[in-house]
Image (cartoon, grey):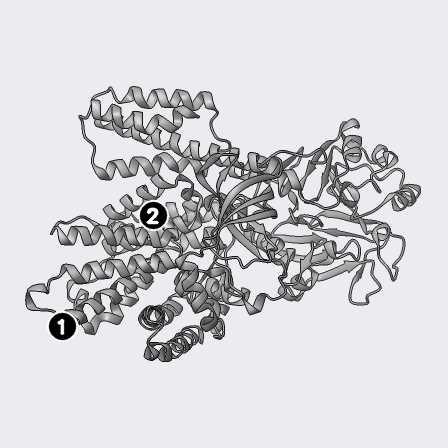
Amino acid sequence: MQLIIFSPFIYLFTLWQRPPPLISLNLAALAIVLGVFPLLFLAELPQQKVINSLILISFSLLYFPFKFIRIISLGLWAFIFGCWHGHQILEQITYFSEFSRSAIVVIDSALLEDKTKENEQKPRYRIQLIESEGKYIFPRLYASVLWNSKALLCAGQKWHVTMKLRPVHAQLNQGSYDNQRYSLSIRQPLSGKILQAKLLNETCSVRQDFISKLAPEIQTLKHAGVALALTFGERKWLDKQTRLLLQQTGIAHLMAISGLHIAMASLFGWSLARIAQFFFPTRWIGFRFPLIMGWLTAMLYGWLSGWGIPAVRAILGLTLWIYLRCKSRFCFSWHWALWSAALILLFDPLAILSDSFWLSFTAVMALLFWFHWMPLPEKIRHGWQWVLLRGLHMQLGMMLMLLPLQILLFQGINIASLVANLWAVPIVSFLSVPLVMLGLVCLLFPSIQFFLTIQSWLWQLVDYSVSLALAPLSVLTHSWIEIGYYPIVITLAGWFGVVVWRLGWWKSHKWLLSVSIAIIACYSKCSNEHQWRFSMLDVGHGLAVVIDKGGQAIIFDTGNRWETGSMAEKVIVPYLRWHRLTPEQIILSHDHLDHTGGVAYLNDKYPDIQIRSSFINQAHLPCIRGEKWIWQGLNFEILWPPEKTAIVGNNQSCVVRIDDGKHSLLLTGDLEKQGEYRLLELEKKHLNTTILQVPHHGSNTSSTALLIRNIMPKYALTSVARYSPWRLPSVKVKQRYKNAGIQWSSTAVSGQITGYFYRDNIKLKGYRQQIMSRWYHQWFGIRGDHE
């Protein structure tokens, strides 16, 4: 890897030796962005031999006197640089997760005592790992740790700690949030706990001091989470209901410190400077001083927000604009957007994995595209009387142009988001943010009683303005429409439609447009080749299986739940939405929380859904031996238990066989040895199956050799968590299946496991291996024996 570290300097030296032909800054920025872009799609990072070959190729291309070849060379170098960052973070993960390690760390997170989170007894801190075993850690690396310390902890303190860390291992399912990719994008791929700690520097950071002084004032507000997000970019304090409200009404962007907020902060600083100029001598009055003060105010706000990607992008753009303004030069808007993206990726190539990166730059490019292809008439572009119309035009463009990304990230749209933005954006921009700025100014003068008096009033006004902005939004959530997943090519049809309208192709090329629309419609409506499908979802320790055909679904078990959520909300419903499925029935295997945890949420979400169980519950359909029915052409048969019972434990698990006439699936819940033996006494000829859900997560109390011999499935699938305290599946049980020649798969290794049933064969796909095979989805760290 040493060659990669020094390759940028060698590359620049080679360019200095052979400078012609020069390439424009725009082309250089484009080459860097396109060079890093493949990191999003690579199944695995290139090995060292391949990277060394690419380095030699990139240098060799410099000796060709063609501009296009130089661009390819620069793009190759950017790709190599991105791969080096990927390899480095994977090596760092392995190093720190292999054993307990000692390191010098700095606390990075700003801890707030949130009254709404008082049940969370063990506080988590985000730490930056600085040095370990005498070696400086580069590129930068972060970890989330549990830290029970008697000393007062704050951001900026330096400690020498001994810690036990483990790699992030997300539950990967279609439609669910990709936490593994997110963790790499923010360079926080490790979590764990502090075992020992020695304080090296107790000084808190200036930002932490700001937060500590303002936190008591803000946390008493009704909308404290929103106020903290607008002030410090700390969105983790937003409650779940507010997050959902903002997402479904299309105004979640207001809670991320981005271009709009940075612009308002800059305008605030500029305005203060202009007011101050009234007291200056005439010779001191010029246009540069307000611009510089606006820039400094924007920098201060970006620093307070923690330098998120949207804020950095906006500040880079603002800096460039002020520089060009002071030098009386000109550039197109898309130039600085492209340069900003290239600079961010140059300093941190893993930012390409961040949703914030794509949301931020897509929003900018969408606006530029909209104003270029759908401009307002010259008369309306100027004058205060047209302000509302110009705002409507901009919000309409944002709504239409960001539809592809919204569908891709959230699988839904809100047709009333235009109304929500027209209402909330002006209030937050022209009331909330300026009031936040005034509140921060008051904080700079703590010894003056006047500022201390009005400070609390200002934060109350911030709270009132946020209440005003959010007041009508709950009504607009009913306009949320779940779309499901569509290929990005289809979702980009809106962009193409704008071009078609602007160029008048809808008049001159009607037949071509009709054919294109027909192809898109047929593609989006076309049925899949498989006859039916099942998915064992990755829900950690628990079970949730979805069987679907013809847009309808049956759910077998619903995963776990906890105080603030459930696997039904986190995994099952997003999966159903992704595939646009309507669930008709829930089958509960037995009455344990890791199998029934999500039933209440699903019942509330789908009031007409039927529930089948072996519980003594009159509202449930029976799930006892002898029950048979046909659903969507599939034969369902209940093999166990023989009767309903008051206590439905593991050995009373409902065992279901699903058969299409050629292939079959056997779902066993948490059946243990006793239940297996009794089932085998009743079923000796009809237990053969193609796919078996391994009983009781592959524990030693189940999967007897007798059961395996009688069933002899082709595939055995188990639903387990990587960091299960029970260390499931059992090594003996796993080996028992492998000795019988049965293909073994687990959700801990594969993520979601989906079986596609065709007329003549079956295809089994794991999320990590086939469905979404990416280098950032793979198993990080070392695999244990039971894994």
Q: Nearer the viewer, mark 2 or mark 1?
A: 1
Amino acid on which disc 2 is placed: Leu
Crowd tier of the residue under label 1, counting other residues whose Cα lies within 10 Å: few below 14, some 14–19, many 20 or above: few
Please report whichever mark, 2 or 1, sits nearer to the chain's N-terminal start. 1
Which dot marks residue 8?
Answer: none
Image coords of residue 248 (percent x, y): 48, 63
* Quarter of the rendering containing residue 31: top left
Amino acid on which disc 1 is placed: Phe
The quadrant the C terminus occupies is top right
Q: Which SS class for mark 1?
A: loop
Image coords of residue 430 (percent x, y): 31, 71
The quadrant the N terminus occupies is top left
Please give the residue where the numbered disc 2 appears in the rendered image.
513
Q: Is residue 506 positioned above or below 477 on the image?
A: above
Q: Is residue 174 left or right of residue 51?
A: right
In contact (CB < 8 Å): disc 2 and disc 1: no
Residue sitting at 21 percent across and 65 percent down? 270
Q: Which SS class for mark 2?
A: helix
Q: Is residue 452 positioned above or below 605 on the image?
A: below
- Nearest to the observer: residue 255 or residue 246: 255
Residue sitting at 19 percent across and 54 percent down? 322
Image coords of residue 640 (percent x, y): 85, 50
Asked if one can make out residue 255 in the rendered structure from this viewpoint, the answer is: no
Asked if one can make out residue 371 in the rendered structure from this viewpoint, the answer is: yes
Please give the residue where the numbered disc 1 appears in the rendered image.
279
Crowd tier of the residue under label 2, counting other residues whose Cα lies within 10 Å: few below 14, some 14–19, many 20 or above: some
Image coords of residue 421 (percent x, y): 37, 67
* Quarter of the rendering containing residue 139: top left
Q: How far is disc 2 from disc 1 in space, using C-alphas?
A: 63 Å
